[in-house]
Image: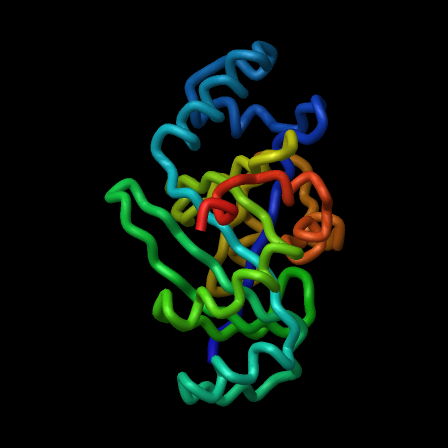
Amino acid sequence: MGKEIEIKFLIREDGINYFTEAFSNIFQLDKNDKYSVLKKANSWVIGNGDVVTQGYISVNSAKNIISNYGIRPDFHIKEARLREVYGKDMKSRYYFTLKSDGSMTRNEIEREISYDIFKQYLVELSEKRIDKFRCCANFQGLRGEFDVYMGRDLFVVEFEAPSIEILNRITPLGNDVTNDPKYKNRNLARDETHRSSHFWNKR
């Protein structure tokens, strides 16, 4: 069992930029030159990142995977997620994740699974899915996950740390939306805009 302790910053959404000077400094550009900052940041994420396609299944549907992999959750399961990560090596890896409820701190269990297991849930996943590019980089000693979403104008950055105290010391890169349920991926996955993505539809 593990703990997910994370903070999430909103960089851009629906044509509005929220990034801070600290974000623009990562790309060595003037914060006031918003077009250049976003262009460079987007190009970096899309050009260097993995394609992450993830969806959510019911807890009841997840019971088969829990049993097959001998998982013994010691918390109330709020969400069950399946994720495909298509890397720069043109290979896919598949993951099953269980999470409890919460905002900055949650219980979490993750296992790598086979495609044979993953493909059994493609129909259910197609209804609650998101697609994004993800590129990782270190910032102030923490690993940041820079996500550019497909099918909508959304850019966020997430950081995980061993404690809330460490996260609270990080310089904000944008608006802190950690406690806003709108930006939880399971809620973003209900948005119709994500269903137009073609990545899984080619299966």
Q: Is residue 189 left or right of residue 63?
A: right
**107, 162: nearer the viewer:** 107
Does any portion of residue 88 appear in the rendered image? yes
Residue drawn at x 48%, y 75% as measured from the top left: 109
Residue drawn at x 60%, y 27% as measured from the top left: 20
**165, 95: nearer the viewer:** 95
Q: Is residue 100 left or right of residue 162?
A: right
Snapshot quadrant of residue 98: bottom right
Residue drawn at x 56%, y 78% as measured from the top left: 62
Q: How many marks?
A: 0
Q: Residue furthest left?
A: 89
| Image: 72 above or below 12 | below
| Image: 189 above or below 198 | below
Residue 61 location (% of width, % of height): 60, 77
**154, 121: nearer the viewer:** 121
Colour setting: rainbow
| Image: 103 above or below 155 | below
Does any portion of residue 136 appear in the rendered image? no
Residue 9 location (% of width, % of height): 61, 41
Residue 202 location (% of width, % of height): 46, 45
Residue drawn at x 39%, y 47% as measured from the top left: 141
| Image: 57 above or below 134 | below
Snapshot quadrant of residue 117: bottom left
